[in-house]
Amino acid sequence: MLDTTGNLILSSNDSIGDTDKAYWQSFNHPTDSFLPHMKVLISSAEIHAFSSWKSENDPSQGNFTMGVDPRGAPQIVVWERSRRRWRSGHWNGVIFSGVPYMTAFTTYQYGFKVTRESDGKFYFTYNPSDNSELMRFQITWNGFEEQKRWNETAKKWQVMQLQPSEDCETYNYCGNFGVCTPSGSPKCRCMEGFGPRHPDQWRLGNWSGGCERRSPLQCQRNNNSGGEDGFKTLRSTKLPDFADVQSISSDPCREMCLNNCSCKAYAYVSGIQCMIWNGDLIDVQHAVDGGNTLYIRLADSEFGRSRMPPYVIILIVLAGLAFLAISIWLLWMLKKRLKVLPAATPACTSSKCELPVYDPSKSKEASIDPEIFLEMQDVASSSDLTVKVVAGR
């Protein structure tokens, strides 16, 4: 029997329509197409569920397969024999994180689900937003994953989207610890804290060799010398492949990475939680739209200055506060002493400023020699004349 979903079922007469009692059904033995209502098993191993044709006109098995890799968080992968050609990025419960424009394709986004069946196993399923539409995902003979919709008017399948659609979507295009930017010139660059493994080849545009770390991490140096490692932020990113997932929050995720010398980076993604990478960072793409934030572990020397331990920072702050307190006390004592000194304020007007003249009759001190007093008067008169000349009088 061929049911309405396209599933060809072989069963006995008394169990027609009951797939649980079917002897055989085509949905359990797919070829090159993933159809709505079809289930793809998510197990502990890679599932190469779909196989391409050998050529455009030869339906025998070809070189490409498509299926689910369950490690970390499930993702769709296209293989060329045993080598990865493309991956969707991790499933976060809504979209595949490496296909950010899924949100723009409602016919693509709607209906992808992970379900747990009565046998206790998990499966990927897909249901279109409009059941009247005929839809399929196909692994083509030349290695592309295509989403197709049947065009009734033209009587043919219409391609809605395909992957990989450009160089940066090709698996690990820039090599380990490299970042691919579709609009970049050049497209490949090394992550901060890393340099080309083969500089001559890199300059020639051969980026497959990837990048290597410039400065060893603290745990990789003798006696754990130097400051504590830190993290550089890489935003809007298709996260690397081969993540380990932990059900913990963001701060413990960071600490878990710092406490493990093998940890190269971490991320915290809604719907997945803590993701940690203990191996090389592979297949990283800077997403034009969407993506996630990756925190890359680097040596303290990569931050432009050596970051001091907390106890040193505390001592510096305390010393600064002590210096400030002493300075305020000294200023207060100086101000207090200045208050006991007599003020000397000459009487000035806008047109004339006269110097005070000594009057011996008003002083209780010893008298001054008259000759010296006359000389002081001459100096005062001369000064008064000078002030008047300068003022234009």
Image (spheres, rainbow, N blue to C red):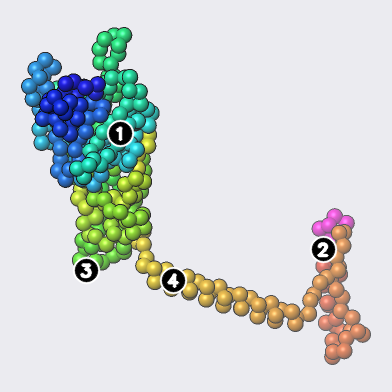
Q: Which residue is mark 4?
A: 314
> At which x and y percent is residue 16?
17, 25
Q: Nearer the viewer, residue 179 or 256?
A: 256
Q: Secondary structure at mark 3?
A: helix
Residue 392 inside the magenta-drawn segment = yes
Q: Amino acid at mark 4?
A: Ile
Q: Quadrant of residue 2?
A: top left
Q: Nearer the viewer, residue 264 or 270?
A: 270
Residue sitting at x 25%, y 15% = 157
Could you tell whether 390 is left or right of 338 in the image? right
Q: Which label's residue is closer to the chain start, 1 or 4?
A: 1
Q: Rounded to the nearest whole Å, what is the CA distance between mark 1 and mark 4?
A: 53 Å
Residue sitting at x 32%, y 31% = 111
Q: Does residue 178 appear anywhere in the picture?
A: no
Q: Which label's residue is closer to the chain start, 4 or 3?
A: 3
Extreme residue toward the right, this view? 361
Q: Which residue is mark 1?
A: 112
Q: Nearer the viewer, mark 4 or mark 2?
A: 4
Q: Which residue is mark 2?
A: 386
Residue sitting at x 83%, y 77% = 376
Q: Which label's residue is closer to the chain start, 4 or 2?
A: 4
Q: Which residue is mark 3?
A: 223
> At which x and y percent is residue 243?
24, 48
Q: Nearer the viewer, mark 2 or mark 3?
A: 3
Q: Which label's residue is closer to the chain start, 3 or 1?
A: 1
Q: Nearer the viewer, mark 3 or mark 1?
A: 1
Q: Which label's residue is closer to the chain start, 1 or 2?
A: 1
Q: Amino acid at mark 1?
A: Phe
Q: Rounded to the nearest whole Å, what is the CA distance between mark 4 and mark 2?
A: 61 Å
Read off the magenta span.
385-393
